[in-house]
Amino acid sequence: MTAVEPRVRVEGITHRFGELTALDDVVLDIAPGELLTLLGPSGCGKTTLLRIIAGFERPSEGRVLIDGDDVTSLPANKRPTNLVFQRPTLFPHLDVFGNVAFGLSVARVDKAEQRRRVAEALALVRLEGYEKRRSHELSGGQMQRVALARALVNRPAVLLLDEPLSALDLKIRLEMEVELRRVHRETGATFVYVTHDQREAMALSDRLVVMNDGHVEQVDTPTEVYRCPSSVFAAQFVGDANVLPVEVLEADSGGSSLLALGEHRMRVACPPTAAGPAWLVLRPEAVRVAGSNANGLPDALTGRVRDVAFRGTGFTYRIELPALGLHVKAETHVASVPHEVDEPVAVEWDGDACWLLERAASETEPPPPPIAAEADLEIAPEPGR
Amino acid sequence: MSATRRSPVTGAVTLLGVVFLWAPLLLVVLFSLHSTGSLTFPFQGFSLRWYEEIFSSPQVRLAAQNSLIVATSSALITLLLGTLAAYGLARSSSRLRGPLALLFFLPITLPGLFIGIALLVAFSRVQVTLSLVTVTVAHLVYVFPFFFLIARSALERLDPALEEAASDLGANRWTVFRRVTIPQVWPILVGAACLAFALSFDEFVITFFVIGPDSTLPLFIWSSLRRTVDPSINAISSLLLLFTLILFMVTFALATWGERRRRGRGLAEDPLALTPVPVAKGAA
């Protein structure tokens, strides 16, 4: 993969809005044909980065290269990129055909070719025969499909998608995810997708770019980011995680370390970490919950259920471990015996389902988990109405 | 304060108000159809003789023609300049945006008398001969703010993301303006131009100061009234009223239609957007 010239290369992009640094020296290569997601909470700079690639913002520093050409100073209309916006932005005075053909007609592609390519693009998003519809006759999902066709019909070098599903209902969103994956497979185009929804990001992407506060935290496949997060932020933002303060007592080069969690000692299989303070990252589904009378479990790992929620696929518990002064989140399978609030239970986990991260000795509490999006702070203001 | 039940007094006052507003208008229309020259009751029967009279009068025709020329040119020039000014300001991110917009529409508060005198003084200072041209310029000063207010709020209510989408699809600024911005707002802009036309067509005070030897319809009515009270004046006034009403209706219909087309469905409330729009952040 490294031998292939990147479709998009982001070279040391820094972007400031007045005093605020929205992006801080971001470096990124996007390979041809991949579906790359910029994932992060509101205000992390992901939309700004997308708008810089699209040509709507000029970065304060750094360069953007597309297929090796420096496009940093080119405006949006001269770049081989097309953007699908968060809100449907279909031209209300044009029908579906007029919308999809817009880019072709601006580029003066001849009429017969326009018709052929529009039909092809509409077939791709499964809206054959919708040419004469107006945008107000379409559902939200259909509007975004038209927007997708309108962008893809121009055969962009990179298709940029700015939270295109966030305005849709959950059900339609799930359907559209399937559609997006199919369209990506069928076109083989390069997609750069922005979202604050980690579930969506994991479901869609070939690679994730986890962003936080203007910088890149981690770039990797969704499974790698989930299994081996590079930071507490990545661990907490991508999937749910217990982040517990531990001491590494013995770091073994064989990949197994002896840890102290309070008074409790355990052995975990993780890549070698230096002895000293560390964070233990434990996914809730790796935590097993047993009735208190289960034999052989150490006292440190017994506690009480403080909260339980039924999730359809299973139960989510919040369990207090008084001996450790901690709460642990656990997810169990739907077929497991349910536990009730205040019920005494014990928890256990496999030593190879854990992950260790560096911790400063002064830190004893993990930072509060980031909130994906309270409101969509990054989007342009609604037209005054 | 919480009187939800209407008292008979409220009803009576409302009725009185309506009568007070409309009775004089109706009287003018009624007597324009009078068969005799009398302007008082008893009413002696209907006839169209006063209308025939004014249509055959060369002075009325000339005045009407002048009014048409002035109103058409001020409406067209306002349409062009006002659209550009409103678009420029609506899309500008300059700090002067608020103050500039204020400068453009504040003349709406100037008394006609003031505009008239000020322009007369200005014209005589630079030694411009008073003519229909000076009247047109004066009317521009008068109607521009009305047009500007409507145009600006229509343009500001457009979703800027639509223009971004167009430029993302390869359109340059002019193409965006021509193919995305204007198609969404032209009915409102043309409607506002009709309003400008109507305002100019029956403008009297300012015209009075800056007109030369020519005459417009309102001036003709006024000068005829000085000589004699002639029922044909009622006919001209009635026609003026009808014409203006039609123009206002066209304005309203275009604005409603345009807004509906833009938003897709539902009836547009306040299609002319006359509810005040905040000038700009921090401008007040």
Image: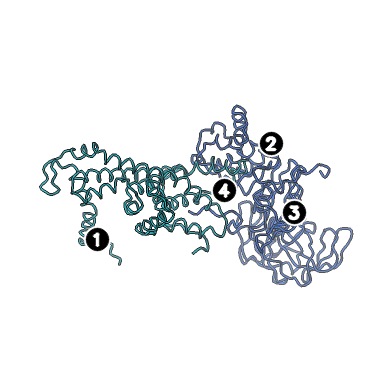
Image: A152 above or below A161: above
Image: B242 above or below B119: above
Image: A110 above or below A85: above
Q: Which chain is cyan?
A: B
Outermost residue toward the top in this view: A112
In the picture, the disc for residue A187 is 2
- Label 3 vs 2, first from the N-terminus: 3
Q: x, y percentage for residue B146?
A: 41, 52
Task: Decide if residue B187 is on the left or right side of residue A1.
Answer: left
Give the letter of the chain under mark 2.
A
Q: What residue type is labelled 3?
A: Gly
Image: A256 above or below A78: below
Task: Decide if residue B134 is on the left or right side of residue A293.
Answer: left
Residue that badge 4 annotates: B161
Q: Which callout, 2 or 4, points to the residue nearer the camera? A: 4
Give the letter of the chain under mark 3.
A
Q: What residue type is labelled 2?
A: Thr
Q: x, y percentage for residue A29?
A: 77, 48
In the picture, the disc for residue B6 is 1
Task: Decide if residue B116 is on the left or right side of residue A294.
Answer: left
Q: The blue chain is which one?
A: A
- Label 4 vs 1, first from the N-terminus: 1
Residue that badge 3 annotates: A62
